[in-house]
Amino acid sequence: MAGKEPASYTISDTANWVARYRAVESARPDAVFKDLLAERLAGETGAAIVARAPKSLHNGWPVIARTVAIDDIILTAIAEGCDTVISLAAGLDTRPYRLDLPPTLTWIEADLPGMIEEKNRLLADETPRCALERVKVDLSDSTARAAFLDHAAQGRRRILVLSEGLLMYLDEPTVAALSADLMAAGVTWWVSDQISPAVRDMFMADMRDILSQAPMHFAPANGVAFYEKLGWRVCEVRSSAEVAQRLNRLPWPMWLLMMLPLPQPDPRNLGKARWGGVVWLER
Ligand SMILES: C[S@@+](CC[C@H](N)C(=O)[O-])C[C@H]1O[C@@H](n2cnc3c(N)ncnc32)[C@H](O)[C@@H]1O
């Protein structure tokens, strides 16, 4: 980003936004992960969006929590025989460089052409820990998406698909169509983050201007039951607030709220709850 700050940001700029939170976390002496490439990747755009984001996001605790939860799930799936990770809308994620991955693992990143080109340029001198491929694809194009998944899945045994930070920018029919494509491609696991309608509405109210080019849609009121109706089995649901509390990253007003003896939101019936988390699904 050079010169004047834009009024709003593109869907691909949201990758810089979340990378900036990973960079800030990584710079802490008590960092819960070290993403040493995040600062370079996030750039000025990431810092500018964080500066304009709601203060309730504080240190980016939902991103820190989802990063830790997803790292853990990926390593668990690899221990259970996962041989391929397909990262949809991989953005500026650097797990292939940062996680302790077996060199026999194949990691396939998919994103829009501009993002892939920029990432290839910025990481040209870095060496991933496993076999890494990057594919330019518009995942909202149903024909291109199905063809990409079909090709990416060929010859693989146990595939984990990651759609971190993507689904909320899609609508329900597109997520359902993506689910059908994942089933058809024979993937074993699907890992994603999930927000409630109240969290989506809060984001869109607080960040209406910034996100006008990248509005959030998908936030089903029936939460993880949305996926169960499509034939997935829920392996695990990890609440972002609970993970952030365990990591000591939760802002104190939320910490106090968590200490109250109130029932936690039901991830299958979110009602008006402000809830977000990571969902690990199995076919
Ligand atoms: C919030 S970022 C998440 C990036 C990454 N998964 C992470 O968590 O750091 C959203 C990403 O979705 C990508 N994206 C959005 N719409 C897409 C589409 N139709 N096809 C492919 N990628 C898309 C953007 O380019 C961006 O990298």
Image (cartoon, rainbow, N blue to C red):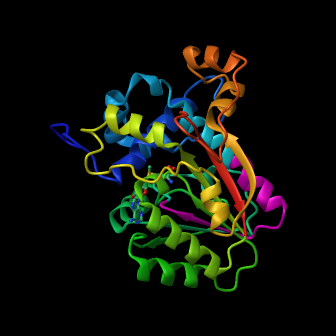
The answer to which image quadrant residue 129 occupies is bottom right
User: Where is residue 202 shown, x and y percent of the image?
Assistant: 40, 34
User: With 62 as the anchor, is 171 left or right in this view?
Assistant: left
Query: Looking at this rendering, what residue extends furthest in the right direction?
Result: 80
User: Where is residue 263 shown, x and y percent of the image?
Assistant: 70, 27
- Quick one: quadrant of the N terminus? top left
Q: Is residue 77 visible?
A: yes
Say which residue appears at 64% left-offset and 56% top-offset: 225
Magenta range: 71-89
Q: Nearer the viewer, residue 106 or 160?
A: 160
Q: How many marks?
A: 0
User: Where is residue 16 shown, x and y percent of the image?
Assistant: 40, 45
Whether residue 85 is in magenta: the answer is yes
Q: Ligand 1 sits in which quadrant?
A: bottom left
User: Where is residue 142 shown, x and y percent of the image?
Assistant: 42, 78
User: With 22 as the anchor, is 187 left or right in this view?
Assistant: right
Whether residue 80 is in magenta: the answer is yes
Say which residue appears at 50% left-offset and 26% top-offset: 59
User: As displayed, is residue 257 above or below residue 179?
Assistant: above
Q: Is residue 100 visible?
A: no
User: As displayed, is residue 251 above or below residue 63?
Assistant: above
- Quick one: quadrant of the C terminus? bottom right
Say which residue appears at 39% left-offset and 70% top-offset: 140
